[in-house]
Amino acid sequence: MTNDKRLALALFLLALAVRLPKLDTYFTADEFLWVERSRNFLGGLLSPDFECLLPNETETNAVPGRGLACTLRTGHPGVVTMWTGAAGITLQWLTRPAGDARTLLQFVRDLPTNPVERRTIAPVRLPTVLLTALFAAGVYLLLRAMFRPPVPLLAGLLIALDPFHIALSRVLHHDALSTTFMLPAALSLILYFGVARRRRWLVLAGVLSGLAMLAKSTSLFLLPYAGLLGLWSLLAMWARGKATFRRALARTLADGLLWAGTAAATFALLWPAMWVIPAQALHTIYAIGFKYASGGHAKGVFFLGRVMKDPGPLFYPVTWLFRTNFWQMVGVVAAVFGFKFKVSSFKFQVQSFKFQVQSFKFKGESRGVKFCARRWVDAFSPRGFGDHFGLLLWVAAFLFFFMVMMTAGEKKQDRYILPVYPMLDIVAAAGLAWLIRARRKAVRWGLVGAVLAVNLGLVVWSAPYYFAYYNPLVGGTPAAARAMTIGWGDGLDKAAAWLNDKPDAAALKVASWYGSTFAPYFRGQTIRYSDQKGNALAGDYIVFYVNQRQRHYPDDEIWQYINDHFSLEKTIFLRGVPYAWIFPAPGIGHSVEDQRYTGIGSLLGWDWRGSPSPDDGPLPAGSTLPVSVYWEYLGKTPEEAFFLRLIGPDGSIWAETTTRPAPEFAGAAAWREGQIIEERGEFAIPADTPPGEYALQIGFYTRAPAVPAGELT
């Protein structure tokens, strides 16, 4: 085994060692969606009779699908993520208990996905961990063909031990996987056009580009990037006299067709939906891409003290400062200063270009333009194997144009620019190498050891809550909590563990933000809530989460109501920052969704306050039932009272009562938009009510002109 292969293997094992431990510690907010998508993807592969609902990004309702069509799950398109998820589900099936005789298809049909069982989490994540560990080794090998030591090894270490990359490579999602293929695809293109014009690099770039586009649609950036490299190649061949312009153009077009054809073939062959419903698959990608580009985050983004749908052009630079680390910052700064002379030389080439253009105009000689083109080409070329400048300019071009593209989109998250981080690791490695230029070999290995020690220390300190890592040089997690949205489900596992220690945990109902993230770890019943305040009131306990509080979602009134009526029992901290708050909750027996009347109110639920109640079984005629009604104030007047009616089997009304605000809510003039109001009343069942099944009708009287009947139910 060569030394390069030994180092690549060492990088793979190092990257794997820091990504594998405690793989099921917590579950992120989007992963249950990817488990569900992977389940349908695998089911579609296994049976032509497997049924599913296909996404329809332009319509409200999904449409039915069957068999291979079920491999279309979303417009991201996330195909690589679903392949890894399907492999993980298969692994879970292979390691099932000995008495489980189900076939893989039966296992897939039965697999719970909402909520996901904790035992599913590690298997579905494992393939992603393996691929992202291979990524660190693969980038090292590609860089060995481009740069002299110690640049490739330094870059490999920075990538393998980047806490932000580690965090995203330990979850079933598409950002790390798209980076795993997108960045090597770009490096392979640079290798082909800038270092060694061997077709194997172009074919490799095509395969990797196809995989990157299958992983995430933002990898379509590789199309214009490859075009830019191809244009430079065309100018290089012509300006250096290696070919006539026509022959150079033909060669460049042939290269482009080979790359694009390989990418397209990879894309189509590895996505079975392209075999059966290609038009629908491509349209779905286009539709969701347009949606992300033109629509911000539905719940808003907390950034620099404000909540907004599009946080603007400063978002990615600021989040990079919090997500980067010491060596990347030092290396990038060193790279800028290290190549200052080259930049000055490049400016000289620009002046020479202008002079030659004027000379061309004066003399009418074609050689002037050709000479000027060569000057430009040389400025972006590696002059000898050890000169990093030209290659780093192409890396910088990737960084600049990708950032421009991502900044132009309204929907922004820090993870969306993950490909930027390993590219910056390459720049940083070159900068660090420049710092120790012309030094002895022992100094170079000393720098490698320092990078390994510092970043490994960061990794150990952050484990396993890597998402809670924020750059200590700019204030760490406390400063990040004041500047940007933090938390993606990490910490909710700790909240569940605390509640599991209660003696009656299995009988408890807990309403939790990110319920899909909380449920795999909680022994009792999880009630999910987002903007459904009624669900939030239905638990014995309620869990608030950090990014919910940052974004005031759905508003501050739910927090205010709980905080006013119950005492905080537990706060969950990560890196010294509160991530979750656990309160007792009303535990109302009947929560209501989607009963919202704009400008009036929203019914949240009701609860019988006495015993026995209808929830306990049949009631004797003549019973009187104390009842509480919970609603959200949106403009309703006190005169617009809530009513409860007992409706008989024939539709007749057997009993009716109205409710009034509880004493603490009696001051209607002080009601706030979104405030939760409790009203109380007594529901009397007449003594002559015959036995039977009766319906309960809840509504309120209203004076709204749009409601001629005078009541809403």
Image: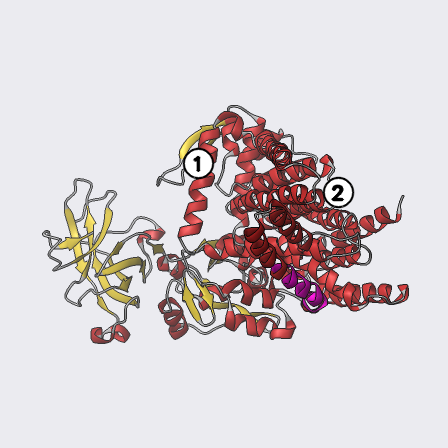
Query: How far apart are labels 2 and 1 at the CA level?
Result: 37 Å
552 is within the stretch colored magenta: no
Neighbour tally class for label 2: few under 14, some 14-19, many 20 plus, Cα within 10 Å: some
Q: Amino acid at mark 2?
A: Ala
- The vertical placement of 74 against 704, above or below, is above
For the residues bearing labels 2 and 1, Cβ distance under 8 angstroms? no
Q: Earlier in the sequence, mark 2 or mark 1?
A: 2
Identify the mark at residue 196; answer none if there is no mark.
Answer: 2
Q: Secondary structure at mark 2?
A: loop
Between residue 240 and residue 545, name the one nearer to us: 240
From where the camera sits, is residue 597 visible?
A: yes
Magenta residues, as a range? 334-350
Magenta-highlighted stretch: main secondary structure? helix
Between residue 522 and residue 37, name the one nearer to us: 37
Identify the mark at residue 283; answer none if there is no mark.
Answer: 1
Q: Amino acid at mark 1?
A: His
Between residue 195 and residue 323, name the one nearer to us: 195
